[in-house]
Image (spheres, rainbow, N blue to C red):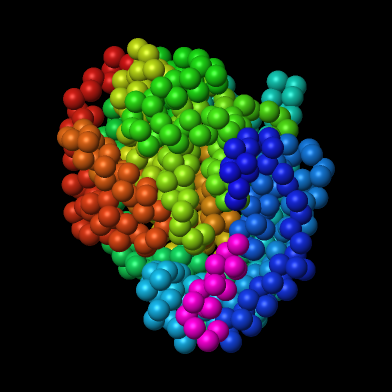
Amino acid sequence: MTKDNLDLKFEDYKYVRPDLEKLIADIRALTERLINAKTVDEAIETYNELNKVTSDADSMVSLAHVKNSIDTKDEFYDKEMQFIQENFPKVEEVSVEYIREFVNSKFRKELEEKFGVYLFQKYENYLLTFNPSIIEDLVEEAKVVMEYQKLLSSCSKEWNGEQLNLTQLSKYSQDKDADVRRKATNLISEVYDEQTEKLDEIYDKIVKIRDRMAKKLGYKNFVELGYKKMGRVDYNAKDVESYRKQIVETIVPICNKLREEQRKRIGLDKLTFYDEPIFFKSGNPAPHGEKDWMLERAEKMYSELSPETKEFFDFMKRKNLFDLDAKSTKAAGGYCTYLSNWRSPFIFANFNGTTHDVEVLTHEAGHAFQVFSSRDYIPEYTWPGMESAEIHSMSMEFFTWPWMDLFFEEEADKFRYNHITHALMFLPYGALIDEFQHVVYENPELSPKERRAKYRELEKKYLPHRDYDGIKVLEEGGFWFRQRHVYQMPFYYIDYTLAQVCAFQFWNKDRKDHKTAFADYLRLCKTGGTKPFLQLLDVARLENPFINGTIKKAVEPIEEYLNSVDASKF
Ligand code: ZN
């Protein structure tokens, strides 16, 4: 990229539809050149050129995605997204051939020295998840997953004369007024109750398709394939099983205690599902200003945290790499992505005046900071695996704790207590969603009703405090209908918990010795995705969550902290 290009602001980033025919021809030609390469340098050259042509196309895909989510009503980008979704599988088909030749190259040893063994592990892993015989299944899977998305976004209920969708209703299910909460929660449950048959049917189809693909590729069931698709090369389902056991033994009792304290704090005889969102009688903490006010504070925060974070945040601000205001035409949710042609991270969010807004400026900024710090690597190493990527974001949430007074003023301690308590309480739910999926894919013949019964049984193990107070669809094991990962991203969910356990370790290290802790964190961010999960833990001097006892050690200091806080004053 020329310097001019790097000085551009986001609004000047120009989208051009990728020329797919040319791209496919280029990849084919590079594959031929790789096969005929006489020296290792020739082989390396094909790889560098491949990265050049594919990252041009990938940049355009990412840019179209960003523009489309900023304005979902913009027909131009809507069409471009459709074009991309329909045509990119053709590119994948030829890329696979290049990758196959690359891992089988006669220069493999020299190439490993040049690019690292991990690149080959990643590629080999990928080749084991794909075969032309499953292309039709993949297309069908994507279609059925889309049905889920469409079904839920089409559901609405009347609220004070207005039709509200599930997201809008869920805001009321967290209202301070118990009657409002109860009414909203019941309406949401009614939606899931009415849609039970369809939601069961969609999931049943998805499970059967995934199982079929696994068998075609020679696996016993979808579990091993699912792990490979997540890019996991250094741990397996057995490791995850014993990790979940640690959560049940160590975290579940702590959460029971925290829920009991919550019940007392908000003055109830029993804590039902309706009341769980209410954490403090005085309401949940919220930032004391609007977007521009928060951005000013974030700028101060990152300039004080370290020279590296200052450089990063100045870059993001100078180039307008944020889109934060909530608008009805924007897509829901928040994310961080990377636009490689412009070497720019990008942060997308929908600010709504809750703690969530500050979390965007710490969590998503943590992702953006990592990718900003690893921009010089080959594309495969720009991002690490998901379980590792969430360490950067979740740890940044903790490294920025000392600056939370800027956002929450006299409520800062309340924010901190709320933040870490919810992080702890997330672990059992994350493990529950994970174990449920293992049961589902190990037993693809289960009927939808049996699946839900199994979920309810597991829910009692991980969330024993949970009291649905007779809400039918939830008593019958239908809570996971709302967890889109179960449909869209199998086996992804546990990654958030693995990263959280690592972020807890950073929280603890930071309190003891900020300088060393932050140096470890920086080294981790700068290592990017050049190594798999367990090796990245070594780089950051973090303990392996799969080893029995790690979780206990990580949360003991947190328990101590929680015991030292008098939450009744909040
Ligand atoms: Zn994240």
Q: Tell me what residue is drawn at x 76 percent, y 62 percent.
A: 19
Q: Residue furthest top?
A: 410
On screen, residue 549 above or below 226: above
- Percent coordinates x, y for residue 226 in the rendering: 49, 67
- Quarter of image, res 555: top left
Main SS of the magenta part reads helix
Q: Tell me what residue is drawn at x 40 percent, y 79 percent.
A: 110
The answer, for residue 216, to whether it is visible in the render is no
Q: Nearer the viewer, residue 61 or 189?
A: 61
- Percent coordinates x, y for residue 113 in the rendering: 37, 74
Q: Nearer the viewer, residue 417 or 531?
A: 531
Q: Tell me what residue is drawn at x 63 percent, y 52 percent.
A: 59
Q: Nearer the viewer, residue 134 or 118?
A: 118
On screen, residue 456 above or below 558: below
- Quarter of image, res 464: top left
Q: Is residue 27 left or right of residue 399?
A: right
Q: Is residue 48 magenta?
A: yes
Q: Tell me what residue is drawn at x 24 percent, y 51 percent.
A: 542
Q: Which residues are magenta?
A: 37-52
- Percent coordinates x, y for residue 179 in the rendering: 54, 20
Q: Is residue 522 magenta?
A: no
On screen, residue 473 above or below 94: above
Q: Is residue 85 left or right of residue 457?
A: right
Q: Quadrant of the C terminus?
A: top left
